[in-house]
Amino acid sequence: MPDRLHFTDSDEANALIASDPMALLVGFALDQQVTVQKAFAGPLVLRERLGAIDAATLAEADLEPVFRAKPAIHRYPGSMAKRVHDLAVHIRDTYDGDGARVWTGAADAEALRANLAALPGFGPMKVTSMGAVLAKHFGVPAARDLVPWHPTLGDVESAQGLADYQAAKRAHKKEWNAAQPGA
């Protein structure tokens, strides 16, 4: 297990998402319509505001005011508070509150893909990106077959790596948009 992931500008947030499976899952849930740095700093802010970031705490808390407190945790505090709540309820009820069981309990890549896809807010892109992080940073054997051909957060190993990944992602998105019919 890595001692940190380099997804934010905060060493403390990077250490949290590397050491706490629920924090990592929350970061991925928040990774939408905000920068990677903002999304993965969210778990630390939640822990600071709530005192804990375990599934039971998140499932039982009224998260919307926590998300809306200044500075807001996400660009869309209401919908993301609901998404994180739903994720926490799923982890609490399906995995007895242990977020790591999403991947440690998966016998193979298809089981892992199904576990990740069942998480609230996890579509195909998040499943492959999370799979790449699990394979490349955590050595999860079942995740190896989920790693896509294109760069993902799994390839980020430093602050510069994050900047390079984000630049490549912007270029890829620009090319993809240009190739769409009517573009």
Image: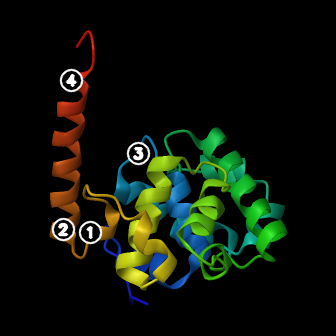
Q: CA distance from mark 3 to mark 4?
A: 24 Å
Say what amino acid the circle numbered 4 marks: Ala
Q: Which residue occupies 15% across, 68% down?
A: 160
- The reply to whether dot 4 and dot 1 touch (C-beta < 8 Å) is no
The residue under label 3 is 34
Q: Which mark is residue 179?
A: 4
The residue under label 2 is 161
Q: Which one is in front in this view, the residue at disc 1 or the one at disc 3? A: 1
Say what amino acid the circle numbered 2 marks: Gly
Q: Nearer the viewer, residue 154 or 46?
A: 154
Q: Which one is in front in this view, the residue at disc 4 or the one at disc 1? A: 4
The quadrant of the picture occupied by the C terminus is: top left
The residue under label 1 is 155
Q: Which residue occupies 47% across, 54% down?
A: 126
Q: Which one is in front in this view, the residue at disc 3 or the one at disc 4? A: 4
- Taking the image as shown, residue 170 lies to the left or right of residue 17, namely left
Q: Position of residue 111 (x, y in %)?
A: 63, 67
Q: Is disc 3 surrounded by few (<14), some (14 to 19) or many (20+) residues within 10 Å?
A: few
Say what amino acid the circle numbered 1 marks: Asp
Q: Position of residue 18 (x, y in %)?
A: 45, 81
Q: Position of residue 26 (x, y in %)?
A: 57, 62
Q: CA distance from mark 1 to mark 3?
A: 19 Å
Q: Is disc 4 surrounded by few (<14), some (14 to 19) or many (20+) residues within 10 Å?
A: few
72 up-or-down from 175: above or below: below
Q: Position of residue 89 (x, y in %)?
A: 79, 61
Q: Which residue occupies 67% across, 51% down?
A: 120
